[in-house]
Every structure is written in structure tokens, then in C-alpha cells.
Amino acid sequence: MFVSALDLDEDADVEKLEYRGIEAWDSVGHITLVAAIEDEFEVQLDTDQVLDLSSYKAALDLVTQLLA
């Protein structure tokens, strides 16, 4: 999802990504990423969850929590 939402190379090291750490993960990229996560896992993120989505690790933890 990170690769497609942020239009990254297939071999990009997404595990180290952080919000605003790369040009593609700006506010628009953030909303695109949130939408991709919501669509992929059929969840609705609340405002706090969207704001807490600050890194790949945070996204992984959030999705793991939502699907538990």
C-alpha cells in the first residue's frame, strides 16, 4: 500500500518511512495512504488514528490492532 499510495519504486525500503520524511508523503500523500489502508482492510480510521499514522511502523501497529 505504501508503494502504490506514495508512488514509490517497487524496491523502496518502506519500513523506514516516516510522515514528511520523503516528498511523496506530504499531506496529500497521507490522505491517499489513509484511503488505501481503509480500502484494503475495510476499516474506517478515526481522526486520532489518522493523526497517529506517522510511520510505516505506526501503520503496521494500527492495522494489526484493528484486525485483532
Image (cartoon, rainbow, N blue to C red):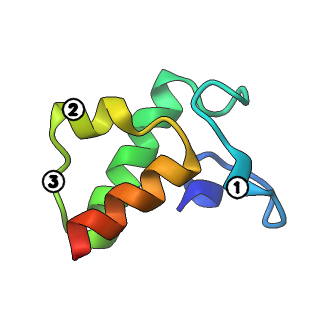
Where is residue 33? Give x, y as percent.
45, 47
Where is residue 18? Give x, y as percent.
62, 36
* Amino acid under disc 2: Asp
Callout 2: few (<14), some (14-19), or many (20+) C-alpha neighbours within 10 Å?
few
Callout 1: few (<14), some (14-19), or many (20+) C-alpha neighbours within 10 Å?
some
Q: Tell me: 58 left or right of 5.
A: left
- Residue at 41% across / 39% down in the picture? 53
Q: Are marks 1 and 2 in contact (CB under 8 Å)?
A: no
* Residue under label 1: 14
> The C terminus appears in which quarter of the rendering?
bottom left
Q: Secondary structure at mark 1?
A: helix
* Amino acid under disc 3: Gln
- In the displayed structure, would residue 43 be above or below residue 55? below
- Residue at 65% across / 58% down in the picture? 3
The Cα atoms of the two marked residues, 3 and 2, are separated by 12 Å
The Cα atoms of the two marked residues, 1 and 3, are separated by 23 Å
* Amino acid under disc 1: Val
- Residue at 69% across / 56% down in the picture? 15
Circle number at residue 44: 3
- In the displayed structure, would residue 19 be above or below residue 53? above
Q: Tell me: 11 left or right of 55.
A: right
- Residue at 56% across / 51% down in the picture? 56
**Picture quadrant where residue 64 is located:** bottom left
* Residue under label 2: 48
Q: Nearer the viewer, mark 3 or mark 2?
A: 2
Foreground residue among 65 and 14: 65
The Cα atoms of the two marked residues, 1 and 2, are separated by 22 Å
